Image (cartoon, helix red, strand yellow):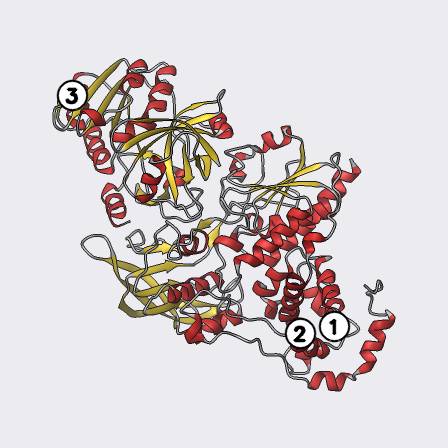
Amino acid sequence: MNKIVSKEQFSAAVTKLVVEAPLIARSRRAGHFVIVRCGAHGERIPLTIADADPVAGTITLVVQAVGDSTRKICALEPGDSLTDVVGPLGKATRIEQFGTVLCCGGGVGVAPLLPIIRAMKAAGNRVVSVLAGRSKDLIILEDEVRASSDEVIIMTDDGSYGQQGLVTVGVEQVLQREHVDRCVTIGPAIMMKFVALLTKKYEVPTEASLNAIMVDGTGMCGACRVTVGGRTRFVCVEGPEFDAHEIDFDELLQRLRNG
Amino acid sequence: MNQDTSRDAQWRVELRQRINPKERTAIDRVVMPQLDPAYRITCNEEVNQGITAEQAMTEATRCLDCNNPQCVTGCPVGIDIPGFIKRIECGQFGEAAATIKLTSSLPAVCGRVCPQEKQCESRCLHNKMKRPPVAIGYLERFAADWQLANEDESSQAAPAVSPDAPRVAVVGSGPAGLSFAGDMAKRGFRVTVFEALHEIGGVLKYGIPEFRLPNRIVDHEIDGLRRMGVEFVTNCLIGRTLTIDDLREQGFRGIFVASGAGFPRFMDIPGENLTGVMSSNEYLTRINLMEAGRGGDTPVMRGKVIAVIGGGNTAMDSARTALRMGAERVMLVYRRSEDEMPARREEVGHAREEGVEFMTLHNPVEYVGDDKGRLCAMRVQRMELGEPDASGRRSPVPVPGAITEVPVDLVIVAVGVSPNQLVPSSVQGLEVSRRHTIVVDEETMCSNVSMLYAGGDIVRGGATVILAMGDGRRAAAAMAAQLQSE
């Protein structure tokens, strides 16, 4: 049992939970995720770690209510507990001094992107972040992202905040005006697909963090398999980040849709 | 309990003389009472109902208590088989169970899932007389179930574990880990078992279905270990949540890695990533561990026409589970003939009785999807048997041009597993094989890293419950000796 320490509602569907998980708080790195379960008959749900406090022994999860299980998790209040939390899972992000790093996140994808932005900044990179959402209230963690970015570009579909347009508009502005050494993208699969197409055109090495369907999250079930460079890979243990230019996004989109 | 259990003990000599061998040999082998196939595929109830006390005593009488019992040599954990069978013949069922427990931590499990026809029963003297062997597996299960139903083990005084006793850690709570934990606890060590999933039991819980091995049986065995002082920690992935170095810092003086062979194998054929193709691990985990279709929140694809690929126990479990999930037609696609199937004979028989269609000498070569990426058919290649391969089985060879397309809406791939590299790759300097298994000394199960032992599928790459338990047992003996000599 892992107790909810605090809760913040980012929008109607997006909730931030700070959860007691001292061992994970100590061992997690940017890019890692956890599997959580809520209730005695609950589903195992993969969630990326947005932040951690090793001293307080907590991790931060940002959850978007999209199905029964995520709605159940979002309905938890401080003092309630998640039935199970296991992690950290997956491979940590490769953090190096690349030069200029473009970090683009869409929707709740900004949450797992935040630790990567921080780590890239701490490694001495110039960090340009592009945050995208359908409307203003779906842009999350802007202050935290600003604190670790040299520049932040905000894109909304409806133009209610920042510039109007898709994430790719903001990404292309940066790619056209300056040399970018590396790109990291996290968000809906369809968004990452188009970011990847764009950065491929500009020949910028790009990592995409995939959110596949999983059961155990430790390599056992194979539900999360994805084709990268013509080979089947498991997102849970070989990912979640892969070379975005090699990912078969169409297959991934079909698997997510049919899931 | 009569203390002397040897073959020369007075009670055994008298028992042998009570009935002559000819009469013993003339008795027919017991038939396991089973649920009717038409009923059992509508539910998840255990198929084998277990034999009665009377049946057990009669079956035990068949055992000749022979001079040189080969059955024991066929048992990976060396159970004193004639010793426990003769207890049953006397009606001393509790003593029979106690005899088994001297060497096996999980008798109720082994009595159900061991391939006895390849182990103990294959070496029974009755075979030489062209008679069916003594039903050792049924008798083992009978003794364990009798104890479970009739003896309140919770009231038995647990052996006091000294707080100063050395601590040992176990990575993984499957059969190898549980067997090791039991043996170390018996020797007075303080044992903690770390499990990555939210449930204890490993493959006994996520893999083997309820109708073959009920969870209450597994839980009972785990409770027994708890009473012996074994501690369990769930949701802890060694290598990630805690490292092997963390465990050493916490004072664990010996570590036994039994993390299993988690990685499902696929065949690398076109269409394998279509929606509707999944591993048997995924299918069985969703249903067994996550209770999909039985009140759990986890969904599972149902499918009307299902093909299961493979011929092992997991393939049988998947096919029979699919029938219970309401499939209209379940085909088992296997590239060799039925004789070469690695599954237990009993499971093959049960699957056939329940209506699984055997498509032997066929191998899938491609899966075909619709415009939305959903599986709708498989293309299968007809095979014929050629020369024996390295495993001694005749190897399947494709028949040129003999490819047919069969409509299916769910394919479950059960062609084996590979070792999960998560734990091995997190230990610096640990020697692993090309197949990613941990390399150990076969006698002691010790790896090249000091005080790090390993066993089960992480060493074998995919074997049976009982072989895993045998590894746990050998590792416990060797680690205990090592720790005591220090």
Disc 3: CA contacts within 10 A as few (<14), some (14-19) or many (>=20): some
Compared to A28, does B157 lie above or below?
Answer: below
Q: Which residue is mark 1?
A: B91
Q: Are marks 2 and 1 on the same chain?
A: yes
Q: CA distance from mark 3 to mark 2?
A: 78 Å
Q: What is the chain identity of the residue bearing mark 2?
A: B
Which of discs 3 and 2 lies nearer the camera? The answer is 2
Quadrant in which the C terminus of chain B appears: top right
- Evaluate if marks 3 and 1 touch, with contact meaning CB atoms under 8 Å apart: no
Q: Residues within 10 Å of mark 1 (few under 14, many from 20)?
A: some
| Element type where label 2 sits in the image | helix
Disc number placed over residue A161 in the picture, else none: 3
Along the viewing direction, whichever of B245 and A56 lies nearer the viewer? A56
Residue shown at 46% from the left, 39% from the top: A84
Mark 2 residue crowding within 10 angstroms, few (<14) / some (14–19) / many (20+):
some
Q: Amino acid at mark 2?
A: Ala
Q: Position of A192 compared to B187: left or right?
A: left
Q: Are marks 2 and 1 in contact (CB under 8 Å)?
A: yes
Q: Amino acid at mark 1?
A: Gly
Which residue occupies the foreground of this view, B111 or A99? B111
Q: Which residue is mark 2?
A: B53
Q: CA distance from mark 2 to mark 1?
A: 8 Å
Which amino acid, mark 3? Tyr
